[in-house]
Image: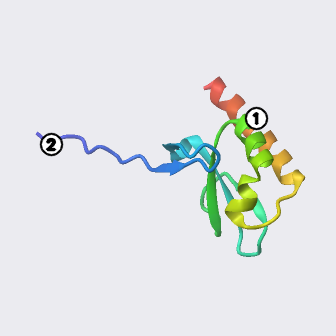
Amino acid sequence: MSQAKKRKIPMRKCVVTGESHPKKDLIRIVRTPEGSIEIDPTGKKNGRGAYIALDPELALQAEKKKVFNRTFETEIDKEFYQELYRFLDHQKARKELL
């Protein structure tokens, strides 16, 4: 009578809300060793990572409160936030289709 082993769901904390979510419900933002800030859909890029929930509203909040500037201790340009906003919008739309 072997019981099916429960798989542990990796949890990560959203840097904007401070709430923990399953890792698959978040997107990783990474500061590469070269110092650039990038969206990391694979979650495997080299560098310092921070997670944000898949909600375009949170990207707006992050930009307003300069969350990633503090997290990565660097100045982040508007283009990154525009890209992040588009990415989150796209991911949210995809999730609603499934």
Q: Which mark is residue 2?
A: 2
The quarter of the picture where residue 96 lies is top right
Instruction: Give the mark nearer the N terminus: 2 vs 1.
Output: 2
Type of residue at label 2? Ser
The vertical placement of 72 against 96, above or below, is below
Q: Residue at x 71, y 29 (%)?
A: 93
Check disc 2: other Cα within 10 Å, few if <14, some if 14-19, many if 20+.
Answer: few
Considering depth in this image, is 58 or 85 the residue closer to the camera?
58
Q: Secondary structure at mark 2?
A: loop
The answer to whether residue 70 is left or right of residue 81 is: left
The quarter of the picture where residue 39 lies is bottom right
Q: Secondary structure at mark 1?
A: helix
The residue indicated by pointer 1 is 89
What's the coloring here?
Answer: rainbow
Task: Residue 1 in the image: state x and y as whole percent.
Answer: 10, 39
Real-space CA distance between mark 2 and mark 1, rounded to the nearest whole angstrom: 43 Å
